[in-house]
Structure formats: C-alpha cells, structure tokens
Image (cartoon, rainbow, N blue to C red):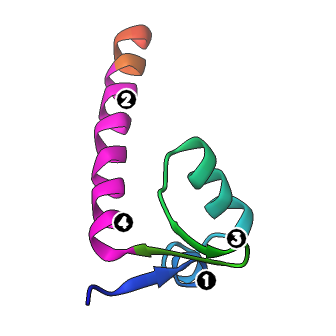
Amino acid sequence: MERRLSKKDLMKLYGVDRITIEDWRRIRGLNMIEVSTHSKYISEKDLLEWENSLKGDYSVKRLNNQSVSE
C-alpha cells in the first residue's frame, strides 16, 4: 500500500501551520483524503503531483512578472 501523509506530517515537512495547509487545500488545490473532520491524508504520489503542478504556476507567474517589469 502506498504511504500516506497526514496534515501533521505536511506541517512538519514544510514548516507551516495548520491554517496554511487548509489554505493550500482551498486555494491551491491540495487534494487530501478526508477520513473524518479531523483526519486528512494525501498519498506521496498525489503530493508530488501537486508540487509539480505548482512549479508550472510559479514559472508562468514569474515570467509574467518579468515581462511587466522590463
């Protein structure tokens, strides 16, 4: 079975608080499996896919900001 990370694991991994994780879920599309209102998990595979999707967003925003400032 694939390893799953809890919200607490993500907080420790990224050095952020619970509110930031919830913002990532709502705003940035972090898709977590909700077992109960207090238990949420994400597979390592889904986490890596989510991280990679953000890299594309950052690159586009960065390019847009560079063209505006030049």
Measured as percent of width and height from the top left, residue 1 is found at 26, 90
- Residue 8: which numbered mark, if any? 1
Residue at screen point 31% across, 46% down: 53
- Mark 3 closeness class: few <14, some 14–19, many ≥20 residues within 10 Å: few
Residue carrying label 3: 17
- Mark 2 closeness class: few <14, some 14–19, many ≥20 residues within 10 Å: few
CA–CA distance in space, label 3 to label 4: 17 Å
Q: Earlier in the sequence, mark 3 or mark 4?
A: 3
Measured as percent of width and height from the top left, residue 27 is found at 59, 42
Q: Nearer the viewer, mark 3 or mark 2?
A: 3
Name the element at disc 3.
loop
CA–CA distance in space, label 3 to label 2: 26 Å
The image quadrant that residue 25 belongs to is bottom right
Q: Amino acid at mark 3?
A: Asp
Pointer 3 and pointer 2: residues touching (CB < 8 Å)?
no
Examine the residues drawn in magenta and state their main secondary structure: helix
Q: Amino acid at mark 1?
A: Lys
Residue carrying label 4: 47
Residue carrying label 2: 62
Q: Nearer the viewer, mark 1 or mark 2?
A: 1
